[in-house]
Image (cartoon, grey):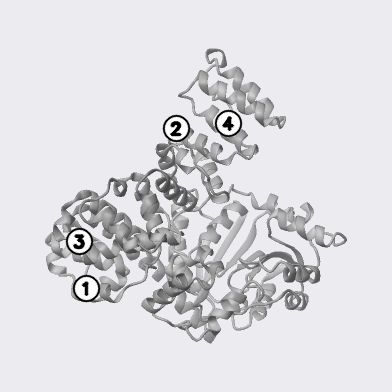
Amino acid sequence: MRYATKMNRVSRARLPQSDFLKDGTEAFIAGRFNLAANFFKKAHQAAPRDPIPLFNLASAKERLGEIDEAATQLTRALRLRGNWIDAAKRLSALSARYVLNAPGNLDPYGLLAAFAFEHIDREPLAATAMSFLRATTMLGGAVHQASMGNAREAARALLLKRTDKTLSHPLLHAALTLGINRDIDVEKLLGAMRRVMLLEMADSRYADKALLGFACALLQQCFNNDHVFALGDDEAEKLARSPVDWEALKTGCVEASQRLLWQLLYHPPEVVIEGHFTSADCRKVRPRILAEVVAGRLKQDEELAALADKLTTIGEIRDATSLRVGQQYHDHPYPRWTSLPVPAKGSARRRLERFFSPERLTFFDAPFKVLIAGAGTGRQAIASALRFGENSDVLAIDLSRRSLAYGQAKAASFGIDNLRFAQGDLLTLGENAELFDIIEAVGVLHHLADPFAGLRAMGDRLRQGGLMYVGLYSTIARRNITRLRRDAAFPGAGADDNTARRYRAKLITTGQDPLLLRSQDFYTLNEFRDLVLHPQETTINLPELQTQLAEAGLIFRGFLLASPVYTKFTATFPDDSWPGTLTNWHHFEEQFPRTFDGMYQFWCEKA
């Protein structure tokens, strides 16, 4: 139930809106949301500088299905109290779940305030900010031009003679710096703007602070998306003719800085700098705004390299497939995330009651052990460590030390002390005597030569009666990817970065797979590799899973799916009780092949 009550610091008798808040709260609890909204409006009119009535009004409007109005009221509340994380969390959640029809009504100052919180999901906020800008500034027309094939002309209008004021908008900078664009038409415009800056812009334009500010925000976006934009031949030629003079750069040479900016807009720092430069060398770089962006990224990379060297190793990594997969994630850490919606500490127990009886979860009352297999850059591991709470001792393993170092650094920033990171292969984890009460293996088993060998290996590390959360690729849901991998134009899993970018650009141009373009993993290069160009991928179907779970001594306890899917399943198989048989789920998936687009994600337990 999401509504706020009046703070104790103000006496109810002194505030005329207090009775309206009280009456509105009572109506909200009773489910009379229209009446509650009216009371909260009156409370706001009585005290227009108080954000609480606006937050409550947003809650009522959300319950009424008036999502645009709910989001608008949240931004108005955030404008009044910029440090209100609950309002920012709710705005992020609404932005993630719904597409706003009237984003131009949002309060831009309140929306900007929401970006200040690292411990919420800023990705939906970035998308909402771009929607607001498209509705209220020249960006909308430019993106439309890009969608019609005129991206370069739109970019020229925004950049070439003068810097359009839209490009200085704080919301644009926040969206580019703190999020990842996942809109094809916006990407076309951003790619064209990068191209115009490299090939057509006079050197004198770089004295414009507004232009430099936008260029550095775009640079941060390129860092965030792993430089996913395709590189044209003419751009490659210009970059080859524009090497960075490293010694001149250290003396504050503006021309050298301009060339560094160009190179970094197209290639990651480890490719461009190759040991020529350190974060400390950035002190003398000019302009200062560029120096700060580059120094921040270099310092992060230096710290991650130091953390990677110190990570412990559990067991030996000797499987040929594991070595090949580990190399991909070393070269292309996945994903390089920037924010995380922080779950409530200890909330996992309540969530698991959907799948297991309360008696099965009593081990939460004492110290217990959790394994996160295939932890990557730690996003899932950090969220799980928080959900499982202080009684849990969580071990996160992965093949890539570089990925794990990113996760360890992020865990430290969240102040998490019940989470350990170690390099290891789940196939050889049996050489370690440690057993676990819970194991999470999501998105890792299907990258083994034999996923079910991995499932059995995980089952061996599970205590009797332990719980396991598993994610596996569905053969039915991955048919489109299978078709791509069999196509003569498929570049192969070992494709270099430029080949991968060009192939991705071809998929955009031809539009041969609209479903693929809707995938969240299509919009960064490392995620695209994981989605389409992985060196090892095995898919399964549910009859196979049913057989293998039985052989591993594991009992299926239910898929993690949205409630409407379960409603449809129950209507299709009314005699099949929770959690449904895998036989019926297989028939359901054949009838509705997009059911498991992400993957099969389910809970099971050791018999």
Marks 4 and 2, Cα distance to the nearest angstrom?
14 Å
**Residue 385, relative to residue 262: is it above or below?**
above
Residue 68: image location, x then y, percent: 54, 40
Counting residues from the start of the chain, the first of labels 4 and 1 encountered is: 4
**Disc number for residue 305:** none
Q: Where's the N terminus, which quadrant? A: top right
Closer to us: 90 or 590: 590
Q: Which residue is identified by label 4?
A: 56
Q: Which residue is mark 3?
A: 201
Q: Are marks 2 and 1 in contact (CB under 8 Å)?
A: no
Of callouts 2 and 1, the N-terminal one? 2
Q: Earlier in the sequence, mark 3 or mark 4?
A: 4
Please name the residue shown 55% across and 55% down the image: 383
Mark 2 lies on a secondary structure that is loop
CB under 8 Å between callouts 4 and 1? no
How far, Cα to Cα, is label 4 from label 1? 55 Å
Residue 435 in picture, x, y percent from top left: 66, 69
Using the numbered discs, state the Cα–Cα distance from disc 3 to disc 1 in whole angstroms. 13 Å
